[in-house]
Image (cartoon, rainbow, N blue to C red):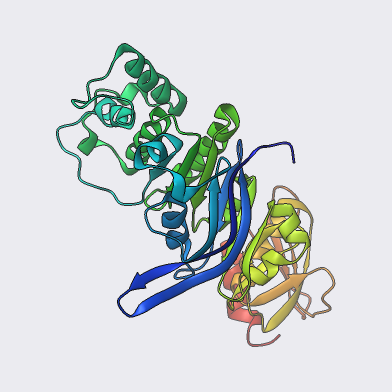
Amino acid sequence: MNQPTTIHIHKLSIGYKSRQGERWVASGLTADIYGGELTCLLGANGVGKSTLLRTLSGFQPGLGGTVRIAGRDLSEYTAEELARMLSVVLTERGDVHGLTARDLVGLGRSPYTGFWGALSDEDNERVNRAMELVGIVHLADRMADTLSDGERQKVMIAKALAQETPVIFLDEPTAFLDFPSKVEMMQLLHRLSRTTGKTIFLSTHDLELALQIADKLWLMGKKTGLNVGIPEDLALDGSLSRFFTHRGITFDENEGLFRVEYTCSKRIRLTGEGRRFHMVRKALLRSGVDACREVDSDFCIDAGQEEGPFFLHAPDGKKLEVSTIGEVIEWVREHLIIHI
């Protein structure tokens, strides 16, 4: 492995201490996180993702095992040293009033400023550079409480960059964003990991995006433990197939993505090529009809060419032409569900 190991955990146990004793959430966790990579932590609710992030961040102690950051045990760091080693971007949308976006990014310089928190020329240069990297220079004078969720999340990432730590942890950074903003955010974090060489580690429920964008995945399950690797290796060794055992979800081993699994009680012959064929088949699956070329049925749907009508063939030899897939589905529901 060419990259330096920034974080190493060995037989780590995580959980909580109380008067009643220790409550373990997960144990025996062993893995590495490397610099210059985007690593995504995936797992069902309650599996311990947030607990693991808090433990790695030093917000709460582990119950066993070790966490080493840059070759040094986490417990050996002082609070001041840790503030210069790692930064944390949390999910909570805290109320921020009276600060501009630039002011908020400037708070990332607090580990380096004096008692009054005044920014030097060098600090201001670091703030400017962080905002340029994230692409939010145009937001500098906007009041923080007027920013959208996506804009505020970018400001918080710029704040983490201004803190100049080699490690950045993020807890559900795409939680409140619409889909295009989720994609943009994940692409931004991936680009930052490559251009800055920082270790970026985040928890997420956006499985599909993580599969397509992350350099490494940590799959965390109560029964399966922790499986670590690049998405393609985890697909080939079956880890991703075992990751979700929920009914209605299946892993497409050829595409390397999860799909909604449909229960089909009917089958029909479908002919055609290209995108129209696949779109008709997709719509029919959603209606509980499995459609493909290999099916031998009295009814038949011809998806046609790239343009033009769809052809519907009935057992009596009648042929109907329709112009949309919506009309195909209506015809299937009216004539085929009963007879096939």
Look at 20% across and 45% down and name the residue there: 95
Outermost residue to the front: 76
Image position of 313 with respect to 302: above or below: below
- Quadrant occupied by the N terminus: top right
* Left or right placement of residue 145 versus residue 208 in this view: left
* Left or right placement of residue 260 versus residue 51 in this view: right
Look at 37% across and 78% down and name the residue there: 21
Residue 255 position by quadrant: bottom right
Look at 82% across and 76% down and name the residue there: 295
Does residue 29 appear in the picture of this structure? Answer: yes
Image x and y of residue 272, in percent: 79, 59
Residue 310 position by quadrant: bottom right
Image x and y of residue 171, in percent: 42, 51
* Left or right placement of residue 166 versus residue 303 in this view: left
Toward the viewer: 314 or 169? 169
Image x and y of residue 322, in percent: 63, 61
Look at 40% across and 44% down and name the residue there: 88
Does residue 323 appear in the picture of this structure? Answer: no
Image position of 129 with respect to 60: above or below: above
